[in-house]
Amino acid sequence: MPYVKINGGEIDDNKGSCQKLVNYLNKENVSGSLANRTFFFSANEDRVKSKEVIQHIDQNVGQLRKDEAKFYMITLNFSPAELKHIRNHKEKIKDYTRGVMEDYDRNFKGRELKPDDIVWYTKIVDTRYYKGTDRRVKEGKAKQGTKKPGLNTHVHIIVSRKDRNNKLKLSPMTNHRSTVKGPVKGGFSRVAFKYMAIDRFDRQFNFKREINELKRYRTFKYGSDQEVKRYLARQKEKNGNMTMELSTNFQLFDELVLDEKENLVELELFVKKKRRKRIN
């Protein structure tokens, strides 16, 4: 499923310039040909130069202290089944990403924001590499640093901490969700945002999602080796002859990280609640 990860990015911190993150996201352009070079895009532009991204994000930091986050990175991770469903079509991924960022805007409670108030830039990346913490590396079935097989397209979004007018601080990492009392008004629900990303994909592309997909994710992400084996045995008994595609569908589970393990349980309950309302 399109799992959403929010953090400071593949960087040491997000309290300074975003240049290091931009350079990291451009790593495929260094070794690739000019014809295959990829560009950043935004809500209204399809080809944004890296220097423009750095300049806009780095200058949009009014009244932020040195120790405060200046930007965040949101990663949209798709399963091979989802990418296969949309034929890994980059324009469809662009349209979907723009819709997700509209949901990001709507998810800030207590703020009168318009979609154009959010400053963000996005890069679509096609490859993933095995890490030392990946299950297949630990099992000796893959080597750290090598490319992962199959469809691995995912999206990195750099989003400014401040709104376009440089007045409001907008943090998706806040622990406030929708408060009306106290020093902090409003909030942001990461669980609701993650659900909206799933729901938008299903509706936009008419994708028929498995009901137990979240349970499967939880098993492969946090389960013991025995729990994983039991799950695969049940699936084999249920589906008969298993194909190699099944194991391929699980290759992203090491990459997909929620803020906390408990948030997965909360998200699962959130999805079930929404489904019951839709059916009724």
Image (tube, grey):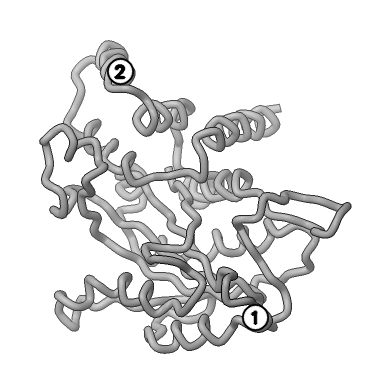
- Nearest the camera: 173 or 25? 173
Q: Position of residue 33 (x, y in %)?
A: 15, 79
272 relative position to 198: left or right:
right
Q: Position of residue 238 (x, y in %)?
A: 31, 13
Residue identified by numbered label 1: 164
Toward the top, the furthest residue is: 237
Sequence-wise, the earlier of marks 2 and 1 is 1
Q: Position of residue 19 (x, y in %)?
A: 39, 80
Rendered residue at 23%/59% (across/down)? 127
- Nearest the camera: 209 or 142? 142
Q: Is residue 83 above or below residue 116?
A: above
Rendered residue at 45%/82% (across/down)? 53
Toward the right, the furthest residue is: 181
Q: Three-letter amino acid code at disc 1?
A: Arg
Visible in this render: residue 252? yes
Q: Quadrant of the C terminus?
A: top right
64 relative position to 57: left or right:
right
Q: Is residue 130 above or below residue 268?
A: below
**Local crowd at mark 1 within 10 Å, few (<14), some, or many (≥20)?**
some
Residue identified by numbered label 2: 235
Q: Quadrant of the N terminus?
A: top left
Q: Three-letter amino acid code at disc 2?
A: Gln
- Nearest the camera: 214 or 80? 214
Q: Is residue 105 above or below residue 39?
A: above
Rendered residue at 17%/48% (across/down)? 149
Q: Is residue 154 above or below residue 114?
A: above
As helix, strand or loop, the secondary structure at mark 2 comes to helix
Within the image, what quadrant is residue 110 found in? bottom right
As helix, strand or loop, the secondary structure at mark 1 comes to loop
Rendered residue at 51%/52% (across/down)? 204
